[in-house]
Structures are given as C-alpha cells and as structure tokens.
Amino acid sequence: MAGQALAGIRIIDLTQALSGPFCTSLLADQGADVIKIESPRGDMLRHTGPFGDGDENPAYGGVFGNANRNKRSVVLDLKVPEARDALLALIDDADALVENFSNGVMERLGLGYDELASRNPRLVYTSIRGFGDARGGVSPYANWPAFDIVAQAMGGLMSITGQDASSRVRVGSGIGDTVPALFAAFGTVTALLEAKSSGKGQYVDVAMVDSVLAVSEVVVNNYAYTGVSPEPIGNQLRGFAPFDVVPAKDGEVTLGAPHNPQWAKLCAVMERPDLVTDPRFDTDHKRWVNREPLYEIVTAWTSSHTVAELVELLGGKVPLGPILDAADIFADPHYAARNMLPQLPVPGTDREIAVTGVVPKLSRTPGEVRHRAPLLGEHTVEVLRSAGLNNAALAALQTAGGTVIEGVLS
C-alpha cells in the first residue's frame, strides 16, 4: 500500500456522539494513528442503531461503526487519577487532541489546553462545541448544550429549508454535526502543518453553529445585500432558474440550467430555440424574476418524458440527475467505481456492512478505510504498553477502577 498523508501523526480522540468522531475518522482515513479514549460505558453512539438482525453486540451501532473506523479504542475512566495519569503519558507523545465535551469539562478533569500545552508545547488541541470556546470569542450561549438540530436552527439553515415559511425543517442528515467535523479536521491539519515549521501547537476552536452558518450562504448573502431574511422556497435556489426538482411522466428529476450556456442547451433539446432570445428569459437574472412562466414551459416539457428519457436526453448536456434513494445508491456504478461503499466486518456476526468511503482521492498518498471500528477497549493493553505501562501498572490501573481489561495480562 502506498504511504498515507498523515502517517506518523498520533491523535488522542476524546470525542463521542457524531461531530468529534466524524472529524477524527477523516484524519484516521488519511493514516493518522487515532487513539479513541472511552469511558467504561463507551461512546454513547455505540448504543444507537441501526442494528442488523442477529447482531450480538449491543454496543456496536451502525453510525458508530461508520464514524470510528480506522481507530484504536482504549478504556480510561478519567475520574480516576491513575487513568488520568495514563492519558497524560499518551498525550505527552501525541501530535493532536480532539475533544467535544461541554464547556469547562476538560478543565475540571485537569485536561484543559493550558495544562496540556505546558506539558507538550507542540500539541494541537481541537475542540468542537455548540457555541465554541472563549478563546475564539465568548458567546452568550457558551454553556448551552447543542445537538445537530440546534446547530441547524441557530446557524440559519432551518430558516431557509422547507417548502415555505410555515414548514421549516431540518436537513435530513446530521450536517449540524458533520459540517463542524469537516471544519475541525481542516483546522487540525492546518495547525499541524504550521507546527511542523514553528514547533508550536495551538488551540483550534470550532463552534457547531458557526460551521452551519458558514455553509448557509443564502442566509448571509441575501441579508447582507438586501436587509431581508430569506425564507424557504422548496428545492429552488434564490437567484437561479431553472434550478429545481421538476416532474417527469413517471417521477421527478433535479434540473439546473440557470446560466446562459446551460439554458441554451436545454432550449435546444426542448426544440425551443426561441426561448434563448425571449426578452423574459435572455439573462440569468430575468429567468429568476420571470421564473413562474419559465417553469410552466420547462415542466410541461419534462412532464411529457419519463425519468429514463430525460436522463438520456439531458444527461451530460445540462446538470440533471435522478433522485437516488439508498437502494439506488448501493446499485449505482458511480459509487462502486469510486469505492464509496467499502465493506467492513461487523463483530459478532458473519456479515460485512458498507460504510461511507474516503472522499478526497489523493493520487500519491491515498486515504483508505483499513479496518472496522474498534470494540470497546479493544486496544487498551497494546496502547498503554506503548506508553510505558507494564503488567503491574496495568493491573494497578484496573484495580483502581480506571480501566477494564478483559482476560489475563500476558
């Protein structure tokens, strides 16, 4: 296997749920050695489905398996002094730490940035919280807990999502978690790159609501220019037309042809070249202003064709795509060709289950989904031994209640 971009980087993962684990999984995919520190109960996401029929392990849910592949798991109860000392030994040799505890928890555990940076000055310390850390700006909501739906609501995305102002909804996926994870991974790698030249780590502060706002460009751009808060308009995109889900004879497709070159190609396929010079539709902006008559014309044409016919007529000419559900995606040749659904074994079963693949395809140092997510504490002994703990120290740690080690130490 070719080398990986983050090989040799060790990251201490003090995260649970989705935002933090998704962040560190991206780093692990690129070769970082991610050591996941869990309490004796384990990451809360372990106990959340989906579970398959016959799954014997109730602490290995599907979302956990996806967000924690390529990692090693160590059980440490950080309320026990001996466990905290073991963690500090790992941190002393680490390049980065990622955590998503509520504000103040790490300081109460004696694991705040200032203390850890004094021990390991090159440590990159990344936090993901609902409203960020004081180092990035003191939010009036700093102590509020947050989930995905809160981030989507307060980050502005829900205000523009839905059919109209009376039916605002959250985006169906947990992007209030995964988008902050992307920013946290970017910030961590950026700080690691800078630390290579300076020899100094730094604090990386990511707020979930900030992250959602940053990708809600409609909210910011429209209000900044017009002073008017945009409202939901279904599947359309403000200022762009045609750009929507449009009907077919046997279903629906997505269609986007808002710019002059795309509009001209669409008109040619519809055999309506007159529409290109129609004064209602001859500029991008006019097509948005006059979108109602435009959609009447376009949808009358799309409704006379099946989805398959529209794909044949427009595919490769203008942006168009059928709406794929999960079954469609698992059968689609694109995702197979791009290795976007690699299979991993599920502990306690004889099955393999797909997880999402690695998105950035690096030509020389490719990322890879190398192995399944760990069982709880699966790597406790090997990791702590690498930090200098011998059998006696491990046994003492277990006796103190700081860890759970299955079987006999050998």
Image (spheres, rainbow, N blue to C red):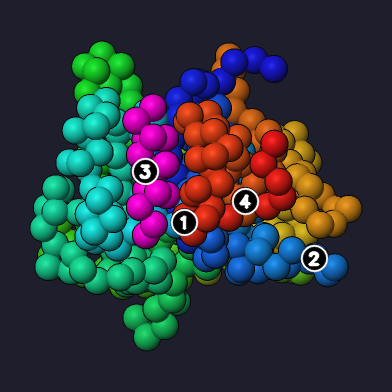
Disc 4 marks a residue whose amino acid type is Ile
Residue located beneath label 3 in the image: 85
Disc 2 marks a residue whose amino acid type is Glu
Name the mark on residue 400.
Answer: 1
306 shown above or below 352: below
Q: CA distance from mark 3 to mark 1?
A: 12 Å
Task: Please name which of the two marks, 3 or 1, marks the residue nearer to the observer.
Answer: 1
Task: Tell me where residue 257 appears, x and y as whole percent.
Answer: 50, 48
Q: Which residues are magenta?
A: 79-93
Query: Which of pointers 1 and 4 lies earlier in the amino acid sequence?
Result: 1
Query: Which of pointers 2 and 4 lies earlier in the amino acid sequence?
Result: 2
Q: Label 2 crowding class (10 Å Cα cut-off): few <14, some 14-19, many 20+?
A: few
Q: Say which residue appears at 39% left-offset and 35% top-offset.
A: 89
Residue located beneath label 2 in the image: 56
Query: Which of pointers 3 and 2 lies earlier in the amino acid sequence?
Result: 2
Q: Secondary structure at mark 4?
A: loop
Q: CA distance from mark 2 to mark 4?
A: 20 Å
